[in-house]
Image: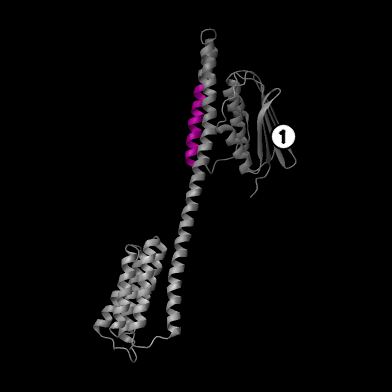
Amino acid sequence: MRISDAWLTVAFVVCAASVTVFVPAGSPYRSQDPAGLALAVAAAGCLWWRRTAPVVVVVVASVLVVVNSVAGYATTVTQWPAWISLFTLFSLRGALDRWVGAVAGLAAVSGYVLSDREPVGAVEVFSLLVCFLIATVTGDAARSRRAATAAEHARVRAEERTELARELHDSIGHAVNVMVMQAGVGRRVFAADPAFAREALGNIESVGREALGELDRLVRVMHAAEPVTDLTGLVDRVRAAGRELRLDAAEVTMSAGVARALHRIVQEALTNALRHTEAGRIDVHLAQVGATVVLEIVNQGGNLRIGPPGRGLANMRERARLVGGEVEAGPIRTGFRVRATLPAQAPS
């Protein structure tokens, strides 16, 4: 039970008791006595369970309204717990429970109209129906708003999981592919060139440590990650795997979000180049044309192995889309090209 509910219940009990004792009921209503006080306090006390058993509370509060009226007491305070509990029911429960609460509420209104000692006219009936509508409509609106908020939170969490999966795929996948390539090179030259093989093993260890550090960084501060515009580390990994890489990178100015997207696109494109070809030069060209950053990566390796589309190209396109850019990828005469055009400043 919430503390606010406890305070609400206590406040209503005190208010009901005070009004019953100190505010005399006028004719034709029965003078307040211990029985009337008990009815008022019982109605207010029902609010203690309004969240844990809202259907029961609505029914009990509605019955108490009718009993209070049949007994000849004024419904000055006994009606309000019924309206509050009806609002709570409509804000928390499903359709069946809401129907039960609506029937109980309307039955209470009907019982009051038929048994009250003061003739109930059209204005009073209209006021009661307005209270009924306010309790039910606002309660249902609160429930719908809470459901919409929960759905939005679920969507955000799903997007965060997708983003984390994309980060892991791009970063760790790149490292693993480089390690595989270096291990293959070391294995092939192990007998003929042990020094080069040892160097490959050292590179594998370094890349593995970097991958573990990257994994730790992603888990801890994924959204606070600093943008990485220096491509030297990626280039050195590819060259250490035995591939020729030519880098032509001009100085570019871009926002942090675009820099992260660019870094991941380069990383994924190089990973695909290592995965799908065993030899051949890789050209990386980066330039800025006005407010647009243009990245072009061409893999000139022969015997290109093209399988079914994987997550790599999809991730690159999604990263570009999120910052307002686009990625084109496909075979050309000299090999396979990935071309990304990104705005220097991501749209807000």
Residue located farthest toward the right when viewing the structure as drawn: 290
Does residue 187 lie above or below 253 as drawn?
A: above
The image position of residue 187, as x and y in percent, is 51, 13
* Closest to the observer, 44 or 253: 44
Question: Which residues make up the magenta segment?
Answer: 204-221
Residue 303 sits in which quadrant? top right
Badge 1: residue crowd in 10 Å (few <14, some 14–19, many ≥20): some
Count of residue discs: 1
The image position of residue 28, as x and y in percent, is 33, 91
User: Can residue 75 be seen in this snapshot?
Assistant: no
The image position of residue 188, as x and y in percent, is 53, 12
Which secondary structure is most common in the magenta stretch? Answer: helix
* Closest to the observer, 73 or 177: 73
Q: Is residue 84 left or right of residue 172?
A: left
Residue beneath disc 1: 287
The magenta stretch spans residue 6: no
